[in-house]
Amino acid sequence: MKWIALSIFLFSFNVLAHPVAYEGAFSFMSINSRDMSENTLVYSPKYWLGTGVKHVEGKDSKWTNAHLGFLAKRWNEFHSQGNFYLFGGPGVVWNRQQSDYFTRYGMQLDWETRRIYTMFKTSIADSKKFGTEQDYEGRIGFAPYLAGFDDFNSWMILQVTHVPGREQEVQVTPLLRMFYQNVLWEVGSSFQGNWLLNLMVRY
Amino acid sequence: MKSLLALVVLTFISFTTLAADVAQVKVKGMVCSFCSNGVKKKFSEFKEVKAVDVNMDENLVKITFNEQQNLDDKKITEVITGAGFNVSEIKR
């Protein structure tokens, strides 16, 4: 039971884009798969800070936590951008048998051009009753065409997740990412047959 | 002679005013249109701004102002920085 709950929680660490946005922006993110759904609302009072709340529902447990994302370093160049983020927050987890407080924290590194996107992220979930576990996620993406500011954007992304101790420790998921103006979608399926449907909207 | 002088001065003032109606801002880090949306949205909130065009190929934000209105370089830099990018150059 412990690893199932933690796996659901760690799976919820997926982020669709940067954990922070421009000053005054609200971001709504929804990540949905066969085993869980996650909804996050984040407000960015500064471009380097994201504050909000995240709710995750799995088959056997529910998780709600405060979300804090911090842009520790950004490298802005004419043809690329790199970022280093720290994120985390306290929360509550419960299932039919028990409930507990938990904390999560992690870091993310990404670098992208208009053609290439790379990302690495690791997170730790820590709960007295449910234990401690770490996950790793890597992404590499490619834009088949260069889209302008007002164009419809498409990306092909390969996502690899590794959660030690999980039944399927490594999952490889090809994704198709599309975005237009302030709306972003991702759709894909892992080679183990787990589908993924994500949505992100910024206001 | 006076009329000619007045005409020259008026023409000069008109051209100066017209030239100040557009600011072209070179921006660093603007590689994703989804993330760059904040630039357009934030500038559009100013009553001084008539239109905002973002050119990803040239890393350029073109701000067209309403007649006899403007934003100074400091404010433009503030908005771009607040959106998470860096200003390289502002041309008027």
Image (tube, rainbow, N blue to C red):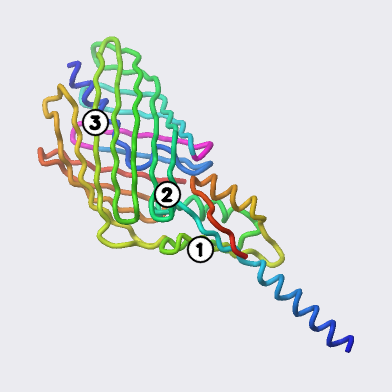
Main SS, magenta residues: strand
Q: Residues within 10 Å of mark 1 (few under 14, many from 20)?
A: some
Mark 3 vs mark 2: tell me if same chain.
Answer: no
Q: In this picture, is A29 found above or below A86?
A: below
Residue appearing at x 16%, y 43% in the figure: A189
Q: Identify the mark at residue B35; answer none if there is no mark.
A: 2
Mark 3 and mark 2 residues within 8 Å of each other at the beta carbon: no
Q: Are marks 1 and 2 on the same chain?
A: yes
Q: Chain of mark 3?
A: A
Q: CA distance from mark 3 to mark 2?
A: 24 Å
Residue for point 32% across, 41% down: A16
Q: Is residue A126 above or below residue B8?
A: above
Q: Which residues are magenta?
A: A33-47
Task: Give the labeled residue for mark 3.
Answer: A136
Query: Residue A187, image x and y in percent?
Result: 23, 47
The residue at 49%/44% (across/down) is A22
B22 left or right, relative to A99: right
Q: Amino acid at mark 2?
A: Cys
